[in-house]
Amino acid sequence: MRNPVYQGGGPLTGATGHARRGRRRTALRLLPLLSLVVLPAPGQARDAPEIISNLCIACHTMDGNALVPAFPKLAGLHAEYLEKQLADYASGARKHEAMQAFASDLSRNEMRALAAHFASQRRHDGVVTDPGLVERGRELYHEGNKANGVPACAGCHKPDGSGTPRSVMIAGQNAPYVAEQLTLFKNDTRTNDRGRLMRTVAGRMTPEEIQAVAQYVASMQ
Amino acid sequence: MTERMTTRMLLGAVLIAVGAGLAGAADEPAQPRAPGIESPGYVWNEREEEKLLALKAEGNAVRGEISFDVCQGCHGFGAPGDVEGYYPRLAGQHATVLIKQMTDVRAGRRDNPTEYPFLTEHVISVQEIADIAAYLAELPVTPDNGKGPGTDLERGELLYRNDCLSCHGPDGLGDAEDFYPRVSGQHYAYLLRESRDIRDGRRRNANPEMVEVIEGYTDDDVMAVSDYMSRLPLKGAAPGEAAVDAQ
């Protein structure tokens, strides 16, 4: 059977090199049109503010500085991190019923737009709810605990908590959220960490150490 | 009788609760175990598999600094290690030695379940092993390493000159080509622990020639020579200093 895609243009069809180039150029110009036909229509493309005011605002607020301490602040986090988390929620790699429902509704471009929006917002200072734990948390954050092999958080998340594209910014994050996530890592419930690193670290931490670090992280500016 | 049964039931309940608690915790990646010095036919520093690949790879110090982030939570910024010797100083160590140790831990020839989860192939690639080694080898060595008690330095020097100098060099700089580690600038507590482990067969990727040399050492001998090594002056063509000079 004849190949239905290949429509000639070989050296034996008689076309000159110039004509072949011209045909190729036309084909290139038609490529964007082709993508319109091939790709599934994502519906009306929505921009970040529109999505946020519909889906995210109630828990995360418009600028991503969640007021309810159980919800994470998104303002100022690395866009790469935010986009990965949205994709992981959608795929179920990070488990959260409500977030899976919201994220499944987003196209990859919308995830990217949301990530860029929240990444560009200014983070407000965090709230420390148990000041008595901050000093212990500071020590753990910067020194780790040699006795149980907990590394200093500062190694990956940086001494000022600003993080890197692959280790989330944690300065000023809400303490209850941080404690919850560390506990989920510890219990093997949150499993979308790189190479099991956070499951290993949190698994070595005591519940007291988790609470102390969460308070210190919230105090970081 | 009933009392004993109650006690047993209580004990059982506690055991189940403890078991459930452990089962609920995240399992760390478990270090594999490869044959080492305890196994017949052991060949020291066999250059094969990942070790060979990492040694052949061209290490990039700039990329290595980025990849080192998962290591510096323990080894510290600039890899000074810690004075108590939990974590060795890596700054200024030969790249070949670092590659050997990383790949030996990864393969399970050097036992280190604490470090292993940070060194799996899901965290660090073979290229990154070479990059990290290149980065660390260029870092300067500072004289603030942990020192021994200084009580038996004469014996330490004598032992070092007789038994260690021919491989590790008069200034303790080791030899990159021969995979002999630099020992100057290292923390006393770490030198002490590793020397003992090598003597007693616990460091399973050790060089049998070295084991033979220090097999007869008493604990006091190991202490004295570790103390002496921790006080070796930081001079000569140290990798770190050479790299700094070249800039």
Image (spheres, coloured by chain):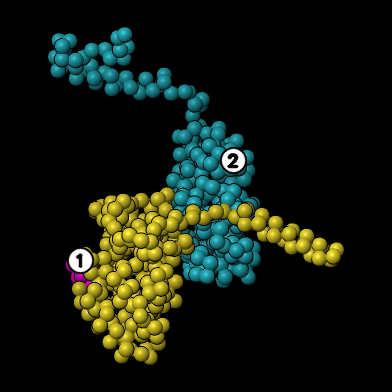
- Residue at 32% across / 86% down in the picture? B156
- Looking at this rendering, what residue extends furthest in the front direction? B40
User: On the image, numbered disc 1 is attached to which residue?
Assistant: B247
Quadrant containing the N terminus of chain B in the rendered view: bottom right
Mark 2 surroundings: few (<14), some (14-19) or many (≥20) residues within 10 A: some
Q: Which residues are magenta?
A: B238-247
Q: Is residue B105 above or below residue B184?
A: above
Q: Quadrant of residue B234?
A: bottom left
Chain coloured yellow: B
| Label 2: chain letter | A
Q: Nearer the viewer, residue B87 or A109?
A: B87
- Residue at 23% across / 16% down in the picture? A23
* Prevailing secondary structure of the magenta residues: helix
Q: Position of residue A147 (x, y in %)?
A: 52, 70
Q: Quadrant of residue B202?
A: bottom left
Q: Position of residue B225 (x, y in %)?
A: 33, 82
- Residue at 33% across / 56% down in the picture? B129
